[in-house]
Amino acid sequence: MTATLLLLEDDLQLSDTVKQFLEFNGYRVYCAYDGFQAQDIVYEKTIDLMLLDVKVPQMNGFEFLKSLRDEGREIPAIFITSLNSVDDVEKGFSAGCDDYIRKPFALKELLVRVESLLKRTFGTHEEKIPLSKGLLFDTKEMQLTYEGRRVSLKTKELKLLSLFLQHPNELLSYEKINETLWGYDEDPSPGSLRTYVKTLRAHIGKEEIETVKNIGYRFVKK
């Protein structure tokens, strides 16, 4: 499963160019042309990284990202903007961005920054993360393998494992987990979540996923 990106850019030609380039390099890209459209996409889809122009209609990029951060959404974000003063850069990072690219930019530079930020999100520069002897999680393909053979897991189980690996030794609340696993039009299921955790424990080890009563779960990285 490839990484899914949100591209917020109201210049239709630039948006199309960036979208085609990123899709050619293996990413899935959803395009928004104003802040409200971007908001809808984030609520309806599972987004791994956001590319945000600042000067867009309805709700500018700074406001859009700040609103997400205020809701506790930690999706990695890169601002792509013609605003280039130190104050603008400072405002971007204050809003919660992870990187900042000034226009005009080279597409190859954008790709390098996207790949770097996605790898940093997983806390590793390796595409395949070893979990135990013979067990590997491929962050790019979103696959778990044991001794080279693919382990059959549901999409939400893979999303949950990916979330745990992005936040090792961190307490993940039910709210944050539900936000990742279920879309805007889906109702979170506590029973299903318990089943997903039970399945992952069966594969990676019971002690690896710690239950914190009435709060959530913690992936214990030794």
Image (cartoon, helix red, strand yellow):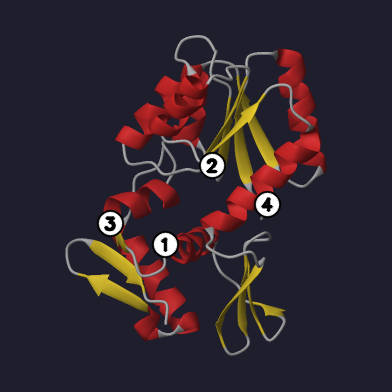
Q: Amino acid at mark 3?
A: Ser
Question: CB of mark 3 within 8 Å of CB of mark 2?
Answer: no
Q: Report the Cα–Cα distance between label 3 and label 2.
A: 19 Å
Residue at the image point whose x is 52% and y is 63% from the top: 123
Q: Which of disc 4 and disc 2 is earlier in sequence?
A: 4
| Kind of residue sitting beneath label 1 | His
Give SS at disc 2: loop
The first of marks 1 and 4 along the sequence is 4
Cβ–Cβ under 8 Å for marks 3 and 1: no
Q: Which residue is mark 3?
A: 173
Residue that carries the numbered disc 4 in the rendered image: 2
Q: Which circle marks residue 167 in the picture?
A: 1
Task: Locate the C terminus by quadrant.
Answer: bottom left
The residue at 30%/75% (across/down) is 210
| Dot in front, 1 or 4 | 1
Furthest toward the top, the residue is: 57
Q: Decide: marks 1, 4 in contact (CB < 8 A)?
A: no
Q: Callout 4, which amino acid?
A: Thr
* Circle 4 residues within 10 Å: few <14, some 14–19, many ≥20: few
